Image (cartoon, grey):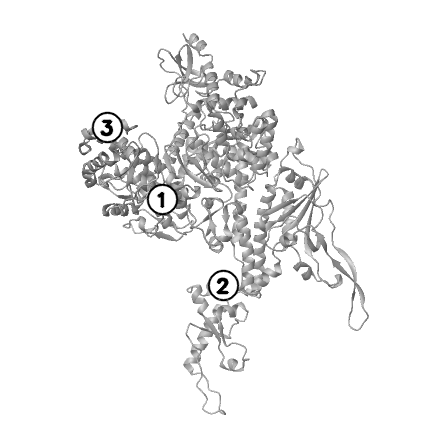
Amino acid sequence: MPVSGISASRTFNQKDFIDPQASHTPASQSAARVRRSTAQDASNQEKRSGWTFLPQSSRRNSLAPLGDRELQDAMRGAALGGTADKRVQVPDRSSIYPVFDAYRSAINSPEARAWFARQGMDMSTVVVKPGSVSGNVTRDGVTRLETFTATDASGWWRISPRVNATAAALDVEGKGLPYLSDDSDVFSRNMILRWYGVKPPTHDGDLGRVRNELGISDWFTLPANTKAELAKRIETARTAVDSIDQRSILATQLEALLGSKPDDEVLVLSGVMVPIGSTSALASGGATEASLSAVLQSLGLPLPETAAQLRNVLRWLHAGLPPAPALGNYAQLISNPWAPGVLSNADKAYLAGLTQVDPNHKNPSRDLFSGGILDSKTPEELRDRAEFFISQALSRARPQAVWEHIALNRHFRGASGTTGYSSQELMQWAIAAILLQIDPEAPGTPGTVAGYDVYSPANTGRSLAQVREDIEAHLRRKLGNDAKAAPLVAHLFLASAAPEFLVRGVPANLRIGSREWADLRLGVTFAERQGGAGCSRGMRYAQVMALSRLDARNPQEAALLDNYGVNVLLDWGLMQGLYTKPAGGLYTPQQHQQAAGAFDAQRRDLIQALSAFKAPLPTRRDLATDYLQTVFPDLNIAQLQALRVSIADPDERRNMKLSEPRTRSLIETYMSGDLTAGRWMLLAPGEQVPQPPAPKTPYGAKPKLSRSDQAAVDQNVKALNARIARLPDVQALLAGKVDTYLANLKQGLSTTTRQLFANLPLEDRQALEWGDVELFALRSEVDNVPTVEQTGQQVEERKGRKGTLVRSEYKGIVRYFEVFPDKMLIVKREDLPARLKLGGTLEDGLTTYGRWAPSVTQLQKGSQEPFDFTAYSADSVPRPGVKSDGVIIEKLGATLTGVAPVQQGDASALVPDSFSSERSVAIVDRIMQGNFVHHRDTVLAASRGALGLEQQREVLRRNDGILLGMIPFVGAIMELAKGNIVEGTRGLIIDTVGAFVGGAGSGVSTLLKSTKVVAPFGSKVFRVLEKGVAAVSGFLNPLDGSADLLALGAKGVFVVPKLLSKTPRSSVLTALGGVEEKLRTYLGVEAGLKQINADVGGQQSRGTFSGLINGIGVNALHVEGQWYATHPETGLPVGTPLEGVRELVTAAA
């Protein structure tokens, strides 16, 4: 393998990778702007290293008192000329300046500016608050104030960490900070006062108090405790931001190092040094750089040894999660299994029965969406802005008061341990009532919405939008008079049942049951488990898919990620027809292994298909060059191309036709079959053929070569003859090479076409699997040529090889499918007659032969047919409603007779294995053999070179089109024709060099040349067979209530590393729980992991109890005559009173 390395002494600098000329135009700002001083310009140069905060320095710290006094003097003057806030210049040596400068830098970073531009925000109106950013946005000529949060899928969560960390250090009371342009050194007077501990004036009479406080204090000699508090505030922000900057800077440098290296290239990175922040644990003694291995180790990442490993490191450096929304997945109060803070069964029954409380239908949960909230709103609007409308309905004062009353009556205690409820807690009560009144078993098992089975095999091959329409229709029937709220209620259910439906930007043609769908669900599971319930709703499709492409960093993490994929893999196997749904939904470890094996087998087949599409068309020139390299091993291709051969015999040269060249390229001579032994001598570049001396008279004997020249020519010919003897006949080999190439291409197209069939809706898969199937080819008529004179070549040339028509008849229903293998497209036709007219029509015509009278002959004529024949014969996509003239339909082979399914049970629910079944193979094989996209004679002619280079390129271009068609959802996320590759696409199927997150794209040809396979067609997380892990047992139910690792209800097996396979079950969960928490720490999310309480005994104090409630180990506290479970982290009493504790305590006494 090739090896690349870097000098151990080299240190990367940000200026090596960022254009120093890059600039931007700051938005207008109402405040006056002050040009930075020379010192400030220098500080800007310091920040070119990529760090948000300026480097710490003792000199800056020593000058801070002077800057603070200067700022205090400015505050005493015109700044206090009135109650209204003023803008005050911030001295660059003041204590507040480092965090002020960091905030200004963070909000003007290229990423932040790009985000604001995408939202179309007026920067002069922007206000940053702890949980949001607001500003005026103009759309369609209407300007309105809009607020974005880190959980609303706007992408603010990717920008906000730096901005929020610096803003929190400045805005101590969370009032909100305005936008600061990067050339402004003025800041809010009131913010500065608060920062130094002075309360701003609230009215004109309050100005005297502020002046008095500023007069008696001296910011030059701030008290030690004040200095310590301010320093701590800055250090907290610096530590948080440095951590973010470290990953960003490291990723930028590693991307530059990676370049376009192939995956298997070995990297030597052991001596590479990289910059580190001042708050890094590696920055001892004021160090500003550390070894790459040490920095990666501090981040929990290994030192990569190959380019493939480096790509995975980069994915981890880019990985991130938004915070979970305040309302989570809307099911915290009623989640399963029960946990402290979750409502009891009695509470759930009470809420479910609220519909019968009042005969006049005054139901508080049903009234939530009344009052005009849903009026004039279309279902599309309600779906798109569901979070907004739900929040609007639940946050009204009257409903909040009603739910507070209900919570008090149920003796509920919130997170504070008291009956003082937050607004979010009251909203949870309202949501719980809505869900329970529709489905008393809510939230139910994953994948179930009020009895509707989302992952039913019947939904295989359908889009998420189609299934959501069914879910809403199902809910409308249950809602009755409130049916208009179905889109919002579906949103509430799906958040816990199938959260992938709420991810933004999912391509419209993603199909349930496909490999891409499995990857999407895996990424969503990762986000929900790591970031907290509801986390994935703040992400877009590409961001979620990037999570599913992460390779584990160690075996323990691999086990954890494997478990995230258990449910997904089992559902995928069910939809593929690998097994039937077991009673009770409980799968076996064997079924999990069956699904994993099938998933891996499909992946291997698709990789082979991709390799076939990437293989170049074998040509005579390529074959000739390859074989010549075997007899000229010391020469490279360029040197071979420079070699020439010349006729060795002067007499033969003299007697040859003038049109025949005497000296030719070695490669072309071999290609044409003219390189025969004894005839040629080899000429190096610049070498000339030895010539005999010129004759003295025209009549004398022809001069001969000198003895030495003749000896040299003979030796040259002899040496070349030895090489020629080892060369095969490329003319004879070419046909075999082309046949092998076409066979591989057919095999690749067969795989991808079977994948198309496997992604069809279930009813169509059943019809193709068990019905009568016929295949038809379309061609154009041979104009004015009698049938008796038509040649096979004429017919073949007119075939529409791009498409094949498939007809199935099953249970009396006829279905048609247009199959376009190289377009990766199947179109279902529901407008065709039950029987097609085959063979065209025969018409009599007159043909004159020689001097004889005209003879009657038959012409085969086509007719107008409801097909877009251009799509069958060219690269265009079929256009609906188009008819084509002169089309002849011909049957391909005999009918494939229908067979009864071998599986037992309801035939309508049976799922065929459409990817691997004999029927699918037979259909696709007939397409490949009878109507393959490339005609052999055409490809062979192009391979020989007879049609010229451009026609060779046309064949390759078509194969490249097939390759691009394998990328799912080309139209949705990639504009390949324009060479634009958008963020997040590199992980779907191929790794496109140069298209890192946020990077620029390239043209189609460059894309194809730089494409390497990296875990295509399905995440590596599903490939448990490759990871050395063992299926320990089938954990078919949540484990003792401990299961944060399995709290979402793993259906089948629990997979753990072999090194843990002999440990007790609870120890396994505890170990993997620690791995999960470490992963959360890396991703920067905080979600408390429920620990397994293996020992529920221990000492008890008065008024407390430890034991099993509903099979769950809890600690309970006696409060105001009731027993409450305590929160595992805070120890506060939460939820409603526990049932049965009094009896347990009495029995223990």
Q: Quick one: label 2 or label 3, which is nearer the N terminus?
A: 3
Q: Does 214 sit left or right of 590 as displayed?
A: left
Residue type at tag 3: Gly
Tags 3 and 1 touching, CB below 8 Å: no
Residue type at tag 2: Tyr
Percent from the top left, x then y, of residue 575?
58, 36
Camera-side mark, 1 or 2? 1
- Helix, strand or loop for disc 1: loop
Camera-side mark, 2 or 3? 3
Q: Which mark is residue 28?
A: 1
Residue at numbered disc 3: 208
Mark 3 Cα-neighbour bin, 10 Å: few <14, some 14–19, many ≥20: few
Residue at 34% across, 47% down: 253
Percent from the top left, x then y, of residue 1032?
48, 30
Residue at numbered disc 2: 627
Q: Which one is nearer the viewer's eye here, 573 or 953?
A: 953
What is the number of callouts on the image?
A: 3
Camera-side mark, 3 or 1? 3
Percent from the top left, x then y, of residue 568?
52, 34
Quadrant of the rendering where the C terminus is positioned: top left
- Helix, strand or loop for disc 2: helix
- The answer, for residue 273, to whether it is visible in the render is no
Residue type at tag 1: Ser
Q: Quadrant of residue 1147?
A: top left
